[in-house]
Image (tube, grey):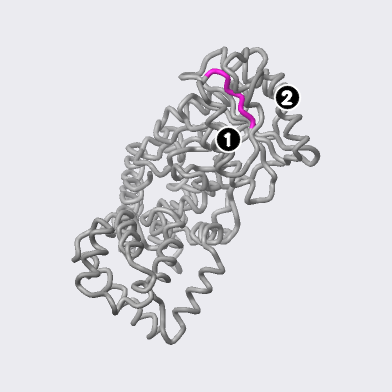
Amino acid sequence: MFTALSEQLAAVLKRLTGRGVLSESDVTEALREIRRHLLEADVSFEVTRGFVERVRERAVGALLVKSVSPGQQIVKLVHDELARMMGALDGAASNVGVQHAAPLQFAPVGPTVILLVGLQGSGKTTTAAKLARRLKLEQKAPGLVAADPYRPAAGEQLRQLGAQIGVPVFGVGDGAVGAQHAAPLHVPALVRDALREAESARCRTVIVDTAGRLQIDAELMGELKALKAAVVPREVLLVADGMTGQDAVKIARGFQDGVGLTGVILTKLDGDARGGAALSIHGVTGVPLKYVGVGEKTGALEPFDPVRMAGRILGQGDVVALVEKAAATVDAKAAERLAQKARSKRGMDLQDFLSALKQMQSLGPMKQVLGLLPGVNAKALQAIPADDKRLKHVEAIVLSMTPAERADPGILSGSRKLRIAKGAGRPVQEVNRLLDQFQQMRKLMKRM
């Protein structure tokens, strides 16, 4: 989402760091460009103006410090103010390695109720499943409650998602909130019943997927207020579509005024929108961004850390997020087996190569993973030929081989390669290219 903004800010800051001496006019010109790029990225005007003024005030002092490159000082100021704009506390950006994300608040006694609110189409139901999966991995024993009697099959969708991630779903069935004949006025009572079921099932956290509308109206707010009063949630999280730009900020302000929010989950952060909502939403509403959706799969939900996100925008990467992603998805035992095989005299075979490929695919889209590495800015990322379809083609070729062929690629004759190519639906040249690359990789691993 921040590809264009990241590229533009990197270009401006590179010009500053490339100079040995900076004048106030140089900084003023750079800030004028940064202001323009932020506004083009759909960042709120008030937030942009405050950001530029704070950087300008602090930059005057940075120009007087002779022991540090003034250009590097300006880069740090921009990074810190970007982090502050997105919710980091003053001075928090300087504490390297500290988590700055706003964590969920859990009730000391009884199940923690998390109310998800938002407009129709913002992705509430899918986000509820993503959040439940994450809480399950954190040993929070989550349960899901369907509380949308208006959208057809909303309860059934939540039930299927719950079955997919292994989380119980309550409020779906005859006379329950998912039923088509459920009266809207009965929703608070039915949700209370679902919460009692969840408590009996020993759920420590309960995520309530509420109904939405196409726009904010008095009826929607009235229902949400009644539901909030009935279940007394610990968290009220707005699920906002990041693709809607400044409309997401207006929606957040409307829900904040109407029912009171404790946080925001911004979806579709992996899209090609300009990203202004993520940069503006805290500055306009004062509500922290708690999570961001970065894909369609149930595992594509990340805690929002303003300091680390500022680093990503400025092309400084996010190694912590990469390590967390690897720890959560990579099979440690399989990785150790691959390492032992690579160190052995015989080396890796194509079956091991396929296992390594699947481990790599589990991290997510290749460009998304590469974007977490320091020094890989938006422009460099666009130049990297990281085609995820190519990985699928490689997998198809290897799976078209027999176990004996995977173990010993040396037995592959021309007729065997032709059979493999037909089985994978790829040209023979691609099979030959894969085998050449595999041999080069095996030689490299042996040398290492």
For the question of whether residue 63 can be seen, the reply is: no
Give the spatial CA distance, label 1 vs label 2: 27 Å
Q: Magenta part of the protein: which range?
A: 145-150
- Location of residue 107 (image quadrant): top right
Left or right: residue 112 versus residue 351 is: right
| Quadrant holding the C terminus | bottom left
How many discs appear?
2
* Residue in view at x 58 percent, y 33 percent: 159
Query: What residue is rendered at 59% in x and 33% in y?
Result: 237
| Residue annotated with mark 1 | 287
Mark 2 residue type: Arg
Q: Secondary structure at mark 2?
A: helix
Give the residue at mark 2: 192
Q: Dividing the picture into quarters, in which one does residue 342 lie?
A: bottom left
* Image location of residue 308, percent across then percent down: 50, 53
Q: Nearer the viewer, residue 429 or 420?
A: 420
The answer to whether 200 appears left or right of 311 in the picture is: right
Q: Is residue 430 above or below residue 339?
A: above
Outermost residue to the right: 109
Q: Where's residue 368, x and y in %?
A: 40, 53
User: Dot 1, how many residues are within 10 Å of its Cα: few (below 14), some (14-19), or many (20+)?
Assistant: many
Q: Tell me the SS state at disc 1.
A: loop
Nearer the N terminus, badge 1 or badge 2?
2
